[in-house]
Image: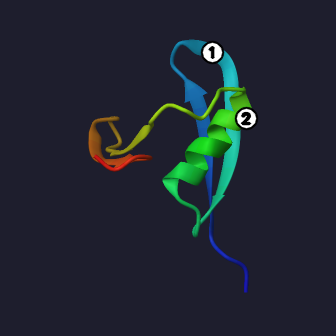
Amino acid sequence: MSSLVFRFRVTFEEVDDVERIIDVGSKNTFRDFHNTLQESIGFDKIKMASFYKTTDNWRPGEEFCTEPK
């Protein structure tokens, strides 16, 4: 039985020509996702990150952080 995989298309508002497709397993954490994203664009992994669950109109909802608040 294979595990569930979520596919994210990552773009940047400030840079039009940068896009990453990142697959994340259902057992991975947001920290895993953050680290994979940082590695894919050559950033260091020392900064905290937040991810937001949004509406269809991109209004932020629930926040997920790589560090506990």
- The amino acid sitting under disc 1 is Asp
- The amino acid sitting under disc 2 is Ser
Q: Is residue 41 above or below residue 7?
A: above
Residue 59 position in % (x across, y down): 28, 36
Towards the viewer: 9 or 27: 27
Q: Which residue is mark 1?
A: 16
Residue 38 position in % (x across, y down): 64, 34
* Residue lying farthest to the front in this orientation: 46
Tell whether 51 sits left or right of 69.
right
Residue at 32% x, 35% y: name it. Answer: 57
For the N terminus, the quadrant is bottom right
The crowding category of the residue bearing disc 1, from other C-alpha atoms within 10 Å (few below 14, some 14 to 19, many at least 20), is few
Residue 26 falls in which quadrant of the image? bottom right
Q: Which residue is mark 2?
A: 40
Disc on res. 45: none
Question: Mark 1: which secondary structure?
Answer: strand
